[in-house]
Amino acid sequence: MLNAVAAEDGGPPAPTGDCRSDLRDLAHRSSHLPPASLDDLPRGRAPIAWTELPRAIEHARAALDPLGFDIDVVITVVDALQAFVRGYAIGELAQQEAVRRSGVGIQQGMDAHAPYLDKVVKSGRHPLLARVIRDAELPHAADRAERGFELGLERLLDGWEANLPVRP
């Protein structure tokens, strides 16, 4: 995500009329734009530079306006979208920093903890965690950050779409 930094290109394109697509585009643009400083992310500052923020808000507002949301809902949707992007970016940065400091890759770390996790599974006391350990593919995927980001983003968009104002 943060490894692909978008060049200044004049901001988001005009809304397409497809709110879901427009918000997805905004999330992707936000995840690829550099914050004022990478140190700002853990402090809870916006994941995009202040100079990009007015365009991002205008883009989201234009995408949501035809759907009948009031301005407070629009602000909340934009804030939630940015919080999701920020949270994912912080997680990715933390993972990269842990690998850098330890010199142990993600899969190597999982392999090192395998004996302990095997005991957890065999104990039967944590069946949901056992299911994650046995069945989850995402933690082992080379593109886990991108796939996880997409999955989370789609669930957020599903929730907003389910709450669209009823049209006569």
Image (cartoon, rainbow, N blue to C red):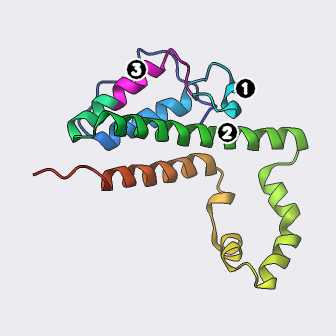
- Magenta includes 65? no
Q: CA distance from mark 1 to mark 2?
A: 10 Å
The magenta stretch spans residue 57:
yes
Residue bearing the label numbered 3: 55
Question: Which callout, 3 or 2, points at the residue further toward the start of the chain?
Answer: 3
Q: Relative to 120, say whether 94 is above or below.
A: above
Type of amino acid under label 1: Asp
The relative height of residue 66 versus residue 156 in the rendered view (above or below) is above
Residue 39 is labelled as: 1
The picture quadrant where one finds residue 1 is top right
SS for dot 3: helix
Amino acid type shown at disc 3: Arg
Nearer the observer, 168 or 30: 168
Pinpoint residue 108: horizontal percent, then vertical percent. Answer: 83, 55
Mark linked to residue 96: none
Q: Is residue 150 left or right of residue 65?
A: right
Q: Quadrant of residue 61?
A: top left
- Side of 65 relative to 35 (left or right): left
Q: Which residue is mark 2?
A: 90
Proximity of marks 1 and 2: CB atoms separated by less than 8 Å: no
Where does the image place residue 37, in percent across and percent down from the top left? 68, 21
